[in-house]
Amino acid sequence: METTITDASNAIWNAFDPPKSDEEWAALEKAALTLIDATKLNAVGGTGPMDKEWAAQPAWKPFNEAMLQASQGALKAIRAKNHEALLAASDQLYPPCEGCHMLFNPGVVNQN
């Protein structure tokens, strides 16, 4: 998570202002695609020391699915260059991340 999801989700969350160039939109697209790929890896147990154990628990799956849906929404907004929709997807991305951390890894909640 630290090397993949954190950087990608922060890129989405920090897109407060509309991207000014195709390169900025491309960087956001890469972040959204990274998050989508990460949800697929998470679904089978990820790579972290506790990921397989967590992924086997029923409570893990809704968080991962919500992260996937928000990431797909972000990707759709980015490809349409729709900043308002990107902000909405960003808002949808935060709750599953925060909720999962609170339940499975509370030591990382609110760390920047």
Image (tube, rainbow, N blue to C red):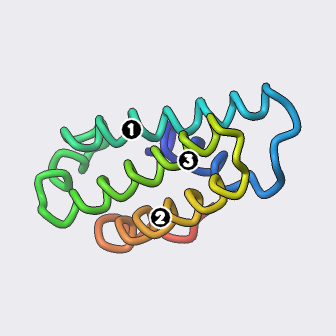
| Quadrant in the rendering for residue 16 | bottom right
Front-most of residues 105 and 83? 83
Of the numbered discs 3 and 2, the one sitting upstream in the chain is 3
The image shows residue 3 at horizontal and vertical percentages of 51, 37
The image shows residue 101 at horizontal and vertical percentages of 39, 66
- Distance of mark 3 from mark 2, alpha carbons? 24 Å
Q: Which residue is located at x 50 percent, y 33 percent?
A: 33
Which amino acid lies under the numbered mark 2 shown in the image of this protein? Val
Of the numbered discs 1 and 2, the one sitting upstream in the chain is 1
Image quarter in which the N terminus is found: top left
Q: Which mark is residue 74?
A: 3
Q: Which mark is residue 38?
A: 1
Of the numbered discs 1 and 3, the one sitting upstream in the chain is 1
Image quarter in which the C terminus is found: bottom right
Which amino acid lies under the numbered mark 3 shown in the image of this protein? Ala
- Distance of mark 1 from mark 2, alpha carbons? 18 Å
Question: In the displayed structure, would residue 13 be above or below residue 8?
Answer: below
Which residue was labeled with disc 2? 108
Question: In the displayed structure, would residue 102 be above or below residue 74?
Answer: below
